[in-house]
Image (cartoon, rainbow, N blue to C red):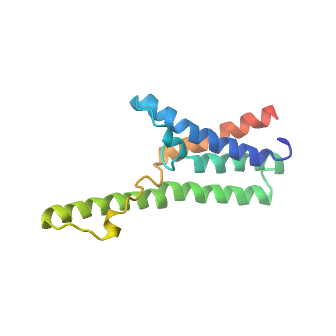
Amino acid sequence: MLQQMYPFWAAIVANLTAQLLKPVIRYIRTRDWDWHLALESGGFPSSHTSTVAALTLAVGITDNFSSTLFAVTLMFSLIVAYDAANVRYYAGQNIRITQQLIKDIQILTQTRLDDPIYLTKVKEVLGHKWIEVFGGIILGLIIAGLMYFIR
């Protein structure tokens, strides 16, 4: 089954590996263990880019690097990487700034904003820094390469 579905399994394993590495890398950096990071988006390495990088390499290996399917997966991967590092990253930054503005308005005007929209907890970490995206790409390529040789 691994041989028949190699691109699929390479992508799945790359995604799971990236997600499971997030709390480990955080612990190594900060000595703070938070297993919830394995279920979160954002952080190092990017699981989105590790998934599409593994898929792209596996498709290139199985269907040829000059195939239409490889071209499609490569374009898909470039879009995902760009989105992770730009669109989603800046959406997270926008959320952070908006939350700070709400706090500042409440402090400066001595007004309590009680509308539920101001009280909603919104996730700030949506996207990735470029180093997190590159880490995901490298991880995905390594996983797909290793899985090719063990299949």
Q: Is residue 85 left or right of residue 100?
A: right
Query: Horizontal and vertical percent for residue 91?
Result: 43, 61
Query: Horizontal and vertical percent for residue 74?
Result: 68, 55
Q: Which is more toward the observer, 59 or 29?
A: 29
Query: Horizontal and vertical percent for residue 47?
Result: 58, 46
**Residue at 78% over, 37% down:** 148
Judged from this view, the residue extending furthest toward the bottom is 115
Can you say which quadrant of the picture contains the N terminus? Answer: top right
Determine which quarter of the picture holds residue 15. top right
Can you say which quadrant of the picture contains the C terminus? Answer: top right
Q: Which is more toward the observer, 114 or 34?
A: 114
Q: Is residue 43 left or right of residue 105?
A: right
Vertical relation: 56 (above or below) 149: below
**Residue at 83% over, 51% down:** 63
**Residue at 69% over, 41% down:** 13
Vertical relation: 102 (above or below) 65: below
